Image: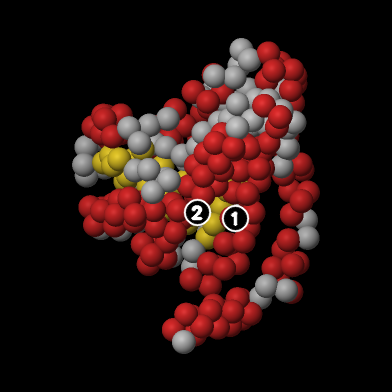
Amino acid sequence: MKYDLADRTVAITGAAGGLGADLAAALTAKGARVALLDLNPDAVCELADHLGGDSVARGWRADVRDLDNLDQVMTEVAAHFERLDVVVAGAGIGSAIGPITGMTHEEWERTIDVNLNGVWRTFKAALPHVAYQRGHLLAVASMASFIHSPLHAPYSASKAGVLALCNSLRPELRQFGVTVGSAHPSFFRSLMVDEVLDDPVARSVWHDFGGLFKLVPREVVVQAIVKGIERRAKQIVVPKRFTITAQAPGLFRPSVERFIFQDSRVTQAITHYVAQQLG
């Protein structure tokens, strides 16, 4: 059954980026109202004006490394639009291409903190509002969730972690009517990709961005994400030639969730947890 986006509110982190801005425009074309969250408040406020103003779109400064900030922003979003149905955790950063021997711990920690911990914080802050609407959580991950490139360990680890986070949350939250999905695009034109296109190390790793790693038009990624939200899809893979690669690790996951992590067991575990916290 199609999840109609008309009159629903969608919050997008990283909304000032190319993908976030294009996604916001595509969602408003579907009749959704969009909350534009980004570290750059001027950019998202300008975008909001372009999309139709406060009744349709509004910008907030949001930092995915700050849970208190996200809690406040999500509360303001729900109050302003009188609901919050869908959250797209789209904020992310790249990482330098190179071997572990030349990597600093600051680079590793920053990549993990923004790309993985940032998704967790975004979902945690949004969940009370999204659960009330029995809505949808979507994390923008990457094909790096499945294809772990050499010389790109922080990014690959962060995106694989996002996939695992979504897979773990899905059976946990479905009893509350909340669905969880992850999007896994291959390379497409963005500020992040533009920074590495001329890097000889990156070109060596990814075969000069040809063949399997040929750039995908950004509008194709946007369209796939919108359709994925409308289907409340578990995974969105772009381009489709990577579908088998993406699905292979999860071949046995439905059986595991059905026979090992049944809703009754998850509910019982949550009940025990609450009792421990109260006791």
Circles 1 and 2: CB atoms closer than 8 Å: yes
Residue 97 sits in which quadrant? top right
Q: Residues within 10 Å of mark 2 (few under 14, many from 20)?
A: many
Question: Circle 2 is placed at which residue position?
Answer: 120
Amino acid beneath label 2:
Trp
8 lies left or right of 2 = left
- Which of the pair 241/1 is nearer the observer? 241
Residue 55 locus on image (x, y percent):
22, 44
- Which of the pair 65/77 is nearer the observer? 65
Task: From this view, report whether residue 168 is shown above or below residue 44.
Answer: below
Question: Circle 1 is placed at which residue position?
Answer: 165
The residue lying at 32 percent from left, 50 percent from top is: 69
Q: Real-space Cα distance between discs 1 and 2?
A: 8 Å
The residue lying at 49 percent from left, 42 percent from top is: 114
Residue 229 locus on image (x, y percent):
50, 49
Residue 243 locus on image (x, y percent):
72, 41
Q: Point out the tag, 1 or 2, that comes first from the N-terminus.
A: 2
Q: How many marks?
A: 2
The tag on residue 197 is none
Residue 220 sits in which quadrant? top right
Residue 206 sits in which quadrant? top right
Task: From this view, report whether residue 59 is shown above or below residue 84.
Answer: above
Residue 67 locus on image (x, y percent):
39, 53
Amino acid beneath label 1:
Leu
Q: Secondary structure at mark 1?
A: helix
